[in-house]
Amino acid sequence: SRAAEPKKPAEGSALFALSLCSALPFLGAPRLGSSGHVRRQVRGAGGGRAQGWLGPPSLDKAQGCVPAIRTEGGRRRSPVPAAVPFLKIIRKALSEEKRVSTKTSAADLVTETDHVVEALILQELQTRFPSHRFIAEEAAAAGAKCVLTPSPTWIVDPIDGTCNFVHRFPTVAVSIGFAVNQELEFGVIYHCTEERLYTGRRGQGAFCNGQRLRVSGETDLSKALVLTEIGPRRDPATLKLFLSNMERLLHAGAHGVRVIGSSTLALCHLAAGTADAYYQFGLHCWDLAAATVIIREAGGVVMDTSGGPLDLMSCRVVAAGTREMAVLIAQALQTINYGRDDER
């Protein structure tokens, strides 16, 4: 069954801030307790060790957050910023002329706003969690290495859908994922123009504006709506493979194949049950990190295009509401080699 339309939050940016900065139970590396069970050491906003949860780490349905933590001084504090200026920057810039440059191809666009928003997000996170690691789109484009280690790691896409953003097409999002021990634990995706906040936390469910998400459960490709993105390359060989993959799915009877210009929001459509499958060659770890948690917590499957387990750094993915659907999509595809994020 298809998901109902979620309600808009009264204060989208405040809700985003709360979910981003207080929803993580994984603010330090896991440690092994004396009983042999994994214990999580939590860091307070000021860097002090937390004495433990003030309550059970259950996901708050309306806000996607966990309880505040207690620092060494005993003070209750939830690390929530007073404002989220980058959301205002994105909304304002959408209606303005932009300075646009290119990265890997003429279709791989970047704007000043991408850089400003990424800097603001990283500054906020680095201030609060100085021992953590960071992988971010524009930093990677400038030469920073994309290596996912066991350390707590934030994976940031400051503006997903930059081409949409340049053309004032309103499908634009901010995506932030979080991993510990190379496992994705939490994800936030915020649709900047529709004020839809998608959150997912491993083992705790996925939500949009407080409403639980659930995938469609479709197993029949002939009844499926499939989403994809083109990828940055426009050379004849790549375009031929891209169009051939689309043709293969349409010949298999898919209801349709859609391209909306934002990988993260397309994946959120899958999590919400408004689409049945997604595939892409040429996306990156910052496109996938948050969305993978959200889809899995909504009951879906995220895997490699070979049919094997997802490799976050492989620049390729198949996702679907069911494993049956994911396998059907993977079997139909021809590989487009974009290399790996961790080998650039």
Image (tube, rainbow, N blue to C red):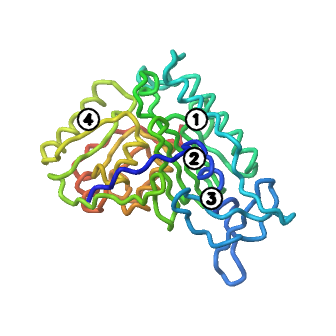
Which residue corresponds to mark 1?
A: 87
The residues bearing labels 1 and 3 have C-alpha atoms spaced at a distance of 21 Å
Q: Position of residue 89 (x, y in %)?
A: 59, 28
Quarter of the figure with the N terminus? bottom left
- Indicate which disc residue 241 carries: 4
Quarter of the figure with the C terminus? top right
The residues bearing labels 3 and 4 have C-alpha atoms spaced at a distance of 40 Å
* In front of the other: 82 or 34: 82
* In front of the other: 309 or 266: 266
Q: Position of residue 200 (x, y in %)?
A: 50, 57
* Left or right relative to 125: residue 184: left
Q: Is residue 98 above or below residue 339?
A: above
| Residue contact between numbered discs 4 and 2, judged by CB atoms under 8 Å | no
Question: Considering the numbered disc 3 on the image, is that residue within a helix, a strand or a loop?
Answer: loop
The residues bearing labels 3 and 2 have C-alpha atoms spaced at a distance of 13 Å
Disc on the earlier residue, 1 or 3: 3
Q: Position of residue 302 (x, y in %)?
A: 38, 56
Q: Position of residue 78 (x, y in %)?
A: 71, 57
* Left or right relative to 341: residue 132: right
